[in-house]
Every structure is written in C-alpha cells, then in structure tokens.
Amino acid sequence: MNETRIDRRFAALKAEGRAALVTFITAGDPDLATSHAILRGLPAAGADIIELGMPFSDPMADGPAIQASSLRALKAGQRMTKTLDMVREFRQENDHTPIVLMGYYNPIYVYGNDRFLADAVAAGVDGLIVVDVPPEADDELCLPALEAGLNFIRLATPTTDSKRLPMVLSNTSGFVYYVSITGITGSSSANAAEVEGHIQRIKRSTDLPVAVGFGVKTPADVAAMARFADGVVVGSAIVTEIEKSLDADRRATGNTVERVLNLVKSLAGALRAR
C-alpha cells in the first residue's frame, strides 16, 4: 500500500512525542445535521483520528451507549449513503484528518462490497474497522480493501494468545486496535497496568502503532494509557455526552455540539499535558 493519512498522522505524532487521540461518534446521531457539526468540530477540539460508526440495528460488541446511538441515528434516517456523504463533505474543508469507518459487515454487504469500497475511497475514507469479519475471511473484505488503498484495522483482545496473534496481524494495516477489556464497549474501565503488558506483547510482534480502546472514559484514563500506547480511543464517553445533552424528546439541543466538543478538548488536553 501507499502511505495513507493514518500512516502520516502516527508518524507525525511519534515525532511530536505523544499518543493519538482517536474519537468515535456514530454517523447521524442524534440527527444528520448535528452529527455533521460534531464531525467538523472534532479536529479543532483535538481529535487526531476520527472513527465514524456505521449505524447498525444489531451490534454485538457495543454496550448500551453506542447501541442507543445507532438506534437514534437509524430512527433519524441515517443510511450508508448519508454516512459516506458526511465524509465527502468533511473532506471539502479537511484533507488531513484520518477518518476510519467502524462497525459491522452487514451494512457493507447489503450495500455491495465492490460498490462500498469504491464509494468509500471516493468519499475520502482512510480505513475500516469491521469487528465481525475474522482473519479467516480476509478474502471477503480485508484484501479487497487493502487493494483499494484503505487501511484495514484489526482488533486484538486480552484473549488473543500468541498462537492467534500472528493471524490477527497478518493483513492489518494503519494501526492495531487493542480492546482493553473483555466484554462490550463502555461496560467497565480498563486497568492500565494489565493493558501495558498486553501492549508490550503485541509490539514485539509488529511495527504498527497500537491504539487502546474500550473502557477508556476520562482524561485520567487517556493520560494513563498514553504512557505506553501509540493511540487512545474514546467512544462510549462521547456518545454518552451526546445522549445527556438531548431534550425530553431525544432531540439535539442548542448545546449538544458544544458539550461534545468540550469533552473532546478535555481528553485532548490530557495528552498534550504530558
């Protein structure tokens, strides 16, 4: 593969001497206009890489907060075409911040793999995280994505042992996403001491950056993980802030965007303070 925005961003941050802040939002949550406003504001708030969730009705790895965000987005009419349009519009004013689409295979399969990959590249997507496509099925989506020029980011977990790890890493590119807890997103907080040992083990097997997600919620969590990880992913805390800002009818309020971006600023501040 040619060098991607993700490669360039991690290289720049390594030279700067700090970890990346990777932020997750669900496309279209709580509505398209508000979601797009948040997306546009994330880089200035301190997000180095953005994960944009592809809403799906039956997410298996996500906790209540992200499940609810997907349902809000779907109820508001979010579809894959609109998600790709969000990226396309974002690229009109920001050509340097990496965007990774994250979610499940079903919406991609329904859209059509070849069509999806072509449209994602044309829109300005940089990478994919598709949590339910295992390495054994790399021919299905991973290898075509790599050939199209998209990073395919694989997840490693606390239960990924030394026998399984080489297969997980074999076609991974961009970075490795280390899931710091066993369980669903937002279900518990990560233990930095335990996570550090797993990160060191993964780094002995790859030169790729390793980012830590699941169970990272607060600026203190971010600072703790940034001591040994190349990136820190925050998702549930951000979508929870969106939910907290909604009115009684579950609609965005005048301070929804501001509240979310202020939270991201506090998370980014924890990295830059180091």
Image (cartoon, rainbow, N blue to C red):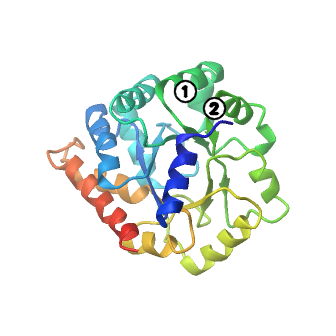
Q: Which mark is residue 133?
A: none
Local crowd size for mark 2, using a 10 Å CA cut-off: few (<14), some (14–19), many (≥20): some
Residue located at (51% from left, 71% from top): 225
Residue located at (16% from left, 49% from top): 255
Amino acid on which the number 2 mark rests in the picture: Gly
Q: For the view shown, which residue lies furthest in the right direction?
A: 163
Of the residues under marks 1 and 2, which one precedes in the sequence? 1
Amino acid on which the number 1 mark rests in the picture: Val
Q: Is residue 12 above or below residue 158?
A: above
Q: Which mark is residue 121?
A: 1
Q: Is residue 56 left or right of residue 33?
A: right
Residues tagged 1 and 2 counted as in contact (Cβ below 8 A): yes
Q: Position of residue 137 (x, y in %)?
A: 78, 37
Element at label 1: helix
Q: Is residue 98 above or below residue 148?
A: below
Element at label 2: loop
Q: Is residue 165 left or right of residue 79?
A: right
Residue located at (65% from left, 36% from top): 2
Q: Is residue 56 above or below residue 7?
A: above
> Is the C terminus in the top left, top right, bottom left or bottom right quadrant?
bottom left
Q: Is residue 35 left or right of residue 223?
A: left
Residue at numbered disc 2: 149
